[in-house]
Amino acid sequence: MLLIFARTHHLLQDKHFVRVWLTGAICNTVRWLEFLGMGMFVFQMTGSAFDVSIVAAVRLLPLFFFGPLTGAIADRVNRSRLLAGSLIFLIAIFSTLGILASLGELRLTHINIAAFLSGLVLSGEHSVRRALLGEISGVKSLAAANGLDRSTDNITLIAGPLVGGLLFQTIGLIGTCAVVCIMLGIALGLIVGVPSKPQMTDAPPVSLFFDIRQALKFALATPAILRVLITTIIFNFCVWPLWALMPIIAATQLHLDPLWTGLLMSTTGIGSLAGALCVIGYVRPRHYQSTFFFSSLLFLFAIALFSVSNSLWGSCIIFFAAGLGLSGFAILQTTIILSVSPRHTRSTIMGVVVMCIGTSPAGIASGGFLADQIGVPNALLLIALTGLIGMCLTRIIIR
């Protein structure tokens, strides 16, 4: 712990880094709170695994189409102002959902539209915020900055589902939307005024899509980045069906109420926090690639085990192990990309990463379809085994 503190305490002395860091903490808490709450609400409304999967897929669809574009824009504008605008848009979305729910007019179509719009914001928030943290921390502190940011993400993965399950069970969807708007308002107050400058001030606006093409060309020609991108596609194709189907598994297989569902999901955050502390303190640059690979395998193996688990406490242990893998994957994904990419294209290349994450709707839709055809456990097992094979082939082929 002393080693971890020694590597991160200088970042916590920078007030601008702290404000961006806390903004990310609030946004990620809201993200998990929303994801779990909406999944439970849709399942209560329709009773369909496929409907739950479609809402999750629609939410992630903009990542694929707009990820590189928002990343390229972020290299040209003030990143903190872009984040502030994104937060205002999110407040408007959740306010509208709350109003519709209070009037008794909320329908599945409204939820899908809101999911798409929040996903549109998400397509830029990830790449913009991570690039802004890298801009503030500098290259030498990238691993520590990403590790600290990921550690906080892990805490939000503990808090988000837990708070989401508690709020949904006690005050319902309307109250949950109100709490979300308050949290986003706090985040908005934090990010306003954080200094940032465009990284490509001399580039003409007409070259925006040229910059995206150049970033893609660089990424595909760099084995370290290419491995990360392909691994990210496989990982998210397999992981998001688990998150999307989680409320259904909890209700039908483990017979849990919303609060216990949130508690189970929170064990992933506990494991992820432990994994982040290990990565920050002990993983050296020469081990980034191998740790990234084995972390990915660990999460997929955990999904396979969970598909055959009927025990709450056994599932908690499995989700803890999944959190260890998730943390190593997420921290080193960003660290490898930012350490290899030229500074002026970091947001654009992170946008390409977001585009790879945006392939996850295909996995979610496949998971929902398979769940209705062969059952949720069999669907998860098949997806996890496919992912494990794909990861190993990627490691062997791309050198």
Image: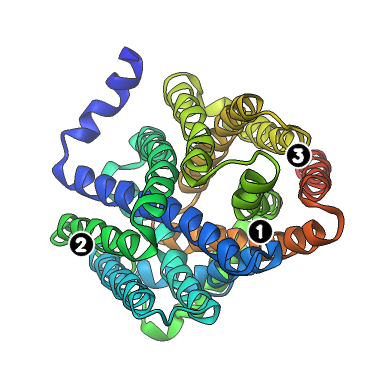
Q: Is residue 74 visible?
A: yes
Between tags 3 and 2, which lies in front? 3
Disc 2 vs disc 1: which is toward the camera? 2
Residue 211 in sight here: no
Check whether the beta carbons of the residues at disc 3 and disc 2 lie within 8 A of each other.
Answer: no
Residue 266 horizontal/vertical position (percent): 48, 36
- Residue that extends furthest to the right in the rendered view of this protein: 374
380 left or right of 15? right
Q: Judging from the image, what secondary structure is the residue with disc 1 in?
A: helix
The kind of secondary structure element at disc 2 is: helix
Numbered tag placed on residue 307 in the rendering? 3
Return the residue at label 1.
220
Circle nearer the N terminus (2, 1):
2
Cα–Cα span, label 3 and label 1? 35 Å
> Which residue occupies 17% across, 57% down?
194
- Residue 62, compared with residue 127, is above or below; it is below
Which residue position is annotated with label 2?
A: 185
Badge 2: residue crowd in 10 Å (few <14, some 14–19, many ≥20):
some
Q: Identify the mark nearer the N-term, 3 or 1.
A: 1
Q: Is 175 positioned to the left or the right of 357 in the image?
A: left
